[in-house]
Each structure stands twice: as structure tokens, then as C-alpha cells.
């Protein structure tokens, strides 16, 4: 049952065509094109930065400020198939994070990242920042998996920094409970040299040690093996350093109480079909989320916003 409705989900919504999207384009700044695998993406090029946003999953796959290196990791083995999650960039996890407790047939990290989103608006402000607003609305296929009515809006602003706001509007008559994440893959030169600061003293669940609850004492966090930690009740900004001379990245957030730090390391990387065996060296996930005990309860008619901003510090 769940499998069939998940496959129904995968096929839904591929209704947009390039022609139907032209009216949203900004000449010289933002245009729709066929990206990898023939999936439609918005390509943004401004004086400040360039970016790609796929309609599938409202998935930011590329962000590169002018005079900087690309900020997001994207696997060269990613599947570029309708309904299959893209490996890298900023997948959107909703309405659950990770495997869905009690529903083994449900898609990991929910269905938002494998659905095709619609385009609500593409605009540019006086400062030259381009903002795209993509929307996903509940329908029969999603209600089969998760029996609620809602609208998601993902506002992506491409300027000197990448700012993403995931907005959830509860269109149900009753409150909804959901988890969410902007599952950001940051590009690094060497994960073994990474130093993540900003989480000192924060409690976390260690997913590589039986979900034990621990406190982050050492600062900064270094990656010395498979790392999969769900930091709870934290609103802090994180900074990521790696090789000397490489760019230092900052991930700041609002509306989020969970930060996830993940690197698959050698064995997990080798087990992932859409991830090259050595790519664990090139990435670290710093995920802006609300998960576990930070699950959101949203009243009928309510709106919740979670924002993540990523910038290059040098
Ligand atoms: O955020 C870390 C994590 O939950 C890991 O446990 C790992 O499963 C990762 O997400 C990737 O999940 P995916 O479903 O995209 O393969």
C-alpha cells in the first residue's frame, strides 16, 4: 500500500514545461533550462553569485558566490531521475526526518525532496538578489502517505549569501506534527581536516553509537570516522573550516532547534550507489532542522518558517 502510493507520488506533478515557465524568467538573471537527466532547473547568474534550483524537490544543487569556490557538494554519481533524491546540494526533508518510525515502506526523509514543486514567483530586489519561491501542495498522493493538508513554500535567495526559508502552512482542520530539514551538503577540501565550531555544550543523539545522548564537549568538532549526530535544542550558528587557505563557511539559522552533522566516511560511502567511494572526503553535512524532540506542532491555519543562510567568510 505505502509502496504503491509512494510510486504514485514519484510520478506526480511533472506537469511543468519550459514554455510554461518562461513567464517567470528574469532576462539576463534567471532562466529555466533542462539540467542533469533532463530535469528542469532554474539557472541564476547575478553579479554576486550563480546557482541552480531544480523543480524536483525545490532542490538547490549549486551555489557559488563571485570570487569564491562552489559552496555546495554535489555527487558525481547522483541519480538524475524523476522521483529519485538528488545526492548533494540542499535536499528538503519533510514531513519526517530519516526513516519514518512505524512505516518501513515510507520514503526516507519524507516526500518533499522527490516531488516536483511549482514556481510561484521569481523576483530581483534593488540590491540584485534574485529570490525564487517554489510551492508544493498536499494532494491525494501525499494524503495517502500523510493524511493532512498543507502548503510548503521554499524561498531561495541568491545573493552574496544563499538564504533559504522553508515555510509550512497548515491547511488542515487539526494541528499537524512534522519534522523538517534543509539537509545541506557543504563542499570541503578534505573532511579529515574539517573543524566545525558553534555546537560546544550542546546535547546530541549519536546515531553511530546507538542513539546515545551525549554533550558536545570538544570544540571544534572534527571528523575522524562515520559521523552522524543530531544536536538538539540549539539555535546556534556553525562555522566550518577545513584545509588552511580553503574557504571558511558559516551556516546561520532561524526557526530551527536541531542541527545535524553528518559524514558517511569510508564504509557508508562505499555502500551508497549514488555517491562515489571517495566523495566522503569532499563533503560535510551541516543540516538546519527540527527533528526528534524538536518536532514542530503547528495549529490549524498556522505558518512555520525555518531559515538557513550559508555564506563564505573568506
Ligand atoms: O542527516 C544524516 C542522515 O540522516 C544519515 O543518517 C544518512 O541517512 C543521510 O541522512 C542521508 O540520507 P539519504 O536518505 O539521503 O541517503
Image (tube, rainbow, N blue to C red):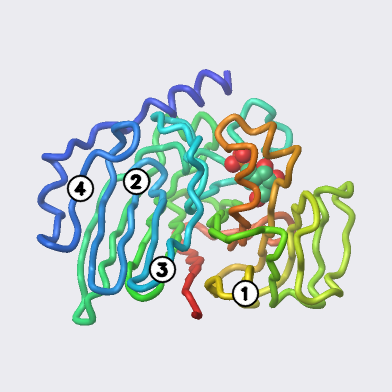
Q: Secondary structure at mark 4?
A: strand
Q: Say whether residue 48 is left or right of residue 98.
A: left
Q: Is mark 2 within 8 Å of ligand 1?
A: no
Q: Say whether residue 31 is left or right of residue 257.
A: left
Looking at this rendering, what residue extends furthest in the front direction? Answer: 245
Do the numbered discs 3 and 4 sit on residues whose CB atoms are within 8 Å?
A: no
The structure residue drawn at horizontal position 12% and vertical position 62%, both measured from the top left corner, is 28
Q: Nearer the viewer, mark 1 or mark 4?
A: 1
Mark 1 → mark 4, Cα distance in angstroms: 37 Å
Q: Nearer the viewer, mark 3 or mark 1?
A: 1
Q: Which residue is mark 1?
A: 244
Mark 1 → mark 2, Cα distance in angstroms: 33 Å
For mark 3, does the 10 Å Cα neighbourhood hold few (<14), some (14 to 19), or many (20 or more) residues?
many
- Vertical comparison of 241 with 280: above or below: below
The structure residue drawn at horizontal position 64% and vertical position 42%, both measured from the top left corner, is 278
Residue 78 picture location, percent across and down: 48, 36
The structure residue drawn at horizontal position 45% and vertical position 60%, both measured from the top left corner, is 166
Q: Which mark is residue 54?
A: 2
Mark 3 → mark 1, Cα distance in angstroms: 23 Å
The structure residue drawn at horizontal position 51% and vertical position 26%, both measured from the top left corner, is 6
Q: Quadrant of residue 190?
A: bottom right
Mark 2 → mark 3, Cα distance in angstroms: 15 Å
Q: Which residue is mark 4?
A: 32
Quick one: 118 or 308, which is closer to the camera?
308
Q: Secondary structure at mark 3?
A: strand
Q: Earlier in the sequence, mark 3 or mark 4?
A: 4
Q: Earlier in the sequence, mark 2 or mark 3?
A: 2
Q: Is residue 98 visible?
A: no
Q: Which residue is mark 3?
A: 162
For mark 4, does the 10 Å Cα neighbourhood hold few (<14), some (14 to 19), or many (20 or more) residues?
many
Q: Earlier in the sequence, mark 3 or mark 1?
A: 3
Amino acid at each position: 500500500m505505502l509502496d504503491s502510493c509512494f510510486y504514485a507520488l514519484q510520478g506526480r506533478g511533472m506537469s511543468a514545461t519550459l514554455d510554461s515557465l518562461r513567464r517567470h524568467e528574469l532576462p539576463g538573471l534567471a532562466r529555466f533550462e533542462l539540467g542533469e537527466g533532463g530535469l528542469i532547473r532554474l539557472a541564476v547568474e547575478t553579479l554576486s553569485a550563480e546557482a541552480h534550483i531544480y523543480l524536483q524537490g525545490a532542490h538547490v544543487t549549486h551555489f557559488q558566490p563571485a570570487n569564491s569556490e562552489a559552496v555546495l557538494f554535489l555527487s558525481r554519481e547522483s541519480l538524475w531521475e524523476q522521483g529519485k533524491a538528488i545526492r548533494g546540494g540542499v535536499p528538503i526533508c519533510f514531513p519526517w526526518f530519516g526513516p519514518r518510525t512505524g512505516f518501513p515502506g515510507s520514503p526516507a526523509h519524507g516526500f518533499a525532496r522527490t516531488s516536483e514543486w511549482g514556481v510561484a514567483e521569481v523576483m530581483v530586489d534593488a540590491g540584485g538578489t534574485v529570490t525564487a519561491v517554489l510551492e508544493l501542495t498536499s494532494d491525494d498522493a501525499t494524503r495517502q502517505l500523510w493524511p493532512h493538508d498543507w502548503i510548503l513554500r521554499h524561498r531561495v535567495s541568491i545573493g552574496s549569501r544563499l538564504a533559504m526559508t522553508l515555510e509550512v502552512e497548515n491547511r488542515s482542520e487539526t494541528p499537524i506534527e512534522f519534522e523538517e530539514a534543509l539537509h545541506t551538503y557543504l563542499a570541503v577540501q578534505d573532511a579529515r581536516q574539517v573543524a566545525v565550531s558553534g555546537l560546544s555544550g550542546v546535547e546530541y543523539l549519536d546515531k553511530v553509537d546507538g542513539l546515545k545522548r551525549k554533550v558536545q564537549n570538544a570544540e571544534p568538532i572534527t571528523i575522524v570516522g562515520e559521523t552522524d549526530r543530531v544536536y538538539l535544542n540549539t539555535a546556534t550558528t556553525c562555522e566550518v573550516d577545513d584545509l588552511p587557505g580553503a574557504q571558511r563557511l558559516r551556516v546561520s539559522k532561524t526557526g530551527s532547534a536541531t542541527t545535524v552533522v553528518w559524514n558517511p566516511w569510508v564504509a557508508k560511502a562505499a555502500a551508497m550507489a549514488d555517491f562515489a567511494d571517495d566523495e566522503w572526503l569532499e563533503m560535510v553535512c551541516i543540516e538546519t532542522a527540527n527533528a526528534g524532540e524538536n518536532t514542530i506542532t503547528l495549529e490549524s491555519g498556522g505558518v512555520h518558517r525555518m531559515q538557513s543562510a550559508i555564506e563564505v567568510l573568506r
